[in-house]
């Protein structure tokens, strides 16, 4: 083979080597861009999740109410934000923060309802009900606020406890904002003797206590509570007690008395 031919082959091999190196560099750059784009997507998703989490539980400003605060009849406590049930001189106090759209609140009510009724009826326990609207903030809608307003209207009529129980017994699915409809709340009032009156209907349809409900919801947010229901017996959080049962609640109340 002539020197000229050998030189030509060597030059061809060198060109091939250079081309392969270029391809490797291009492939490496492509992988880097793909990984970088993936990281950006993940960070973007994380940012979206962070925004959603930061806003979870916040009431929709569109669901807030303006105007004078009209507390329901007999409301007491700080800023008249509590609806009292039971005898005022009962030695034990159960404070309940709840939301009529909240499934966990329904579970608590279903389990403890009869015991609470028994203890309030015997004069051993009084209950301070505080109404929140956390599910409106989490799921959207206005059913929490509207149901709370309707319950306050029932309090005006002296029918709070009965209507309160009816709302939980007929609670829709968490994603179903059925309580946002005045007609639904008025329909459920028919289950309580003497509640379905013109006065009650007007109170529900006009949102008489909407601003009071909004103020109560704000008090819940400022209270630093972890969620609904929040249940305090003489200031001690018993809902977080894994061993708590209706029988244990009754025992603690009776021991305090």
Image: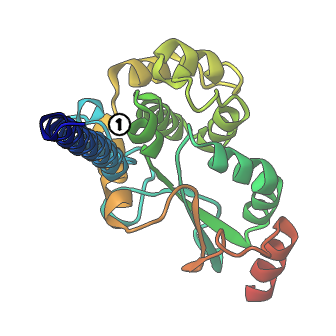
Q: Is residue 72 left or right of residue 191?
A: left
Residue drawn 64% across the image and 28% down it: 173
**Percent from the top left, x then y, of residue 250?**
82, 73
**Percent from the top left, x then y, of residue 126?**
63, 66
Q: Is residue 240 above or below residue 175?
A: below
In this view of the protein, which residue sits in the foreground, 163 or 47? 47
Q: Which residue is mark 1?
A: 209
Q: Is residue 70 visible?
A: no
Quarter of the picture holding the C terminus: bottom right
Secondary structure beneath dot 1 equals: loop
Q: Residues within 10 Å of mark 1 (few under 14, many from 20)?
A: many
Q: Is residue 227 left or right of residue 16?
A: right
Q: Is residue 86 left or right of residue 49?
A: right
Residue drawn 83% across the image and 76% down it: 248
Q: Is residue 81 above or below residue 141?
A: below
Residue drawn 30% across the image and 61% down it: 79
Colour scheme employed for the rendering of this structure: rainbow
Residue 161: which quarter of the image?
top right
Residue drawn 71% across the image and 54% down it: 108
Q: Is residue 10 above or below residue 112?
A: above
Q: Is residue 125 visible?
A: yes
Instruction: Name the outermost residue toward the top.
Output: 183
In this view of the protein, which residue sits in the foreground, 29 or 54? 29
**Percent from the top left, x then y, of residue 220?**
39, 59
């Amino acid at each position: 083979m002539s020197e000229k031919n050998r030189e030509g082959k060597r030059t061809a091999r060198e060109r091939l080597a250079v081309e392969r190196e270029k391809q490797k560099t291009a492939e490496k750059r492509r992988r880097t861009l793909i990984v970088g784009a993936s990281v950006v997507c993940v960070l973007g998703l994380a940012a979206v999740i962070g925004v959603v989490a930061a806003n979870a539980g916040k009431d929709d400003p569109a669901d807030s109410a303006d105007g004078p605060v009209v507390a329901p009849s007999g409301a007491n406590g700080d800023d008249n934000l509590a609806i009292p049930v039971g005898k005022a001189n009962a030695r034990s106090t159960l404070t309940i923060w709840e939301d009529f759209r909240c499934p966990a609140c329904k579970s608590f009510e279903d389990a403890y309802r009869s015991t609470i009724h028994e203890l309030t009826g015997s004069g051993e326990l009084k209950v301070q009900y505080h109404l929140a609207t956390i599910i409106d903030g989490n799921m959207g809608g206005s059913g929490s606020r509207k149901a709370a307003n309707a319950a306050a209207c029932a309090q005006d009529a002296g029918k709070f406890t009965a209507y309160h129980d009816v709302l939980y017994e007929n609670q829709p699915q968490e994603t179903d904002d059925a309580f946002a409809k005045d007609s639904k709340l008025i329909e459920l009032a028919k289950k309580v003797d003497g509640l379905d009156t013109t006065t009650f209907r007007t109170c529900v349809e006009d949102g008489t206590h909407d601003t009071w409900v909004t103020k109560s919801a704000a008090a819940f947010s400022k209270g630093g509570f972890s969620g609904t229901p929040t249940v305090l017996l003489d200031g001690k959080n018993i809902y977080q007690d894994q061993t708590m049962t209706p029988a244990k609640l009754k025992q603690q109340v009776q021991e305090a008395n």
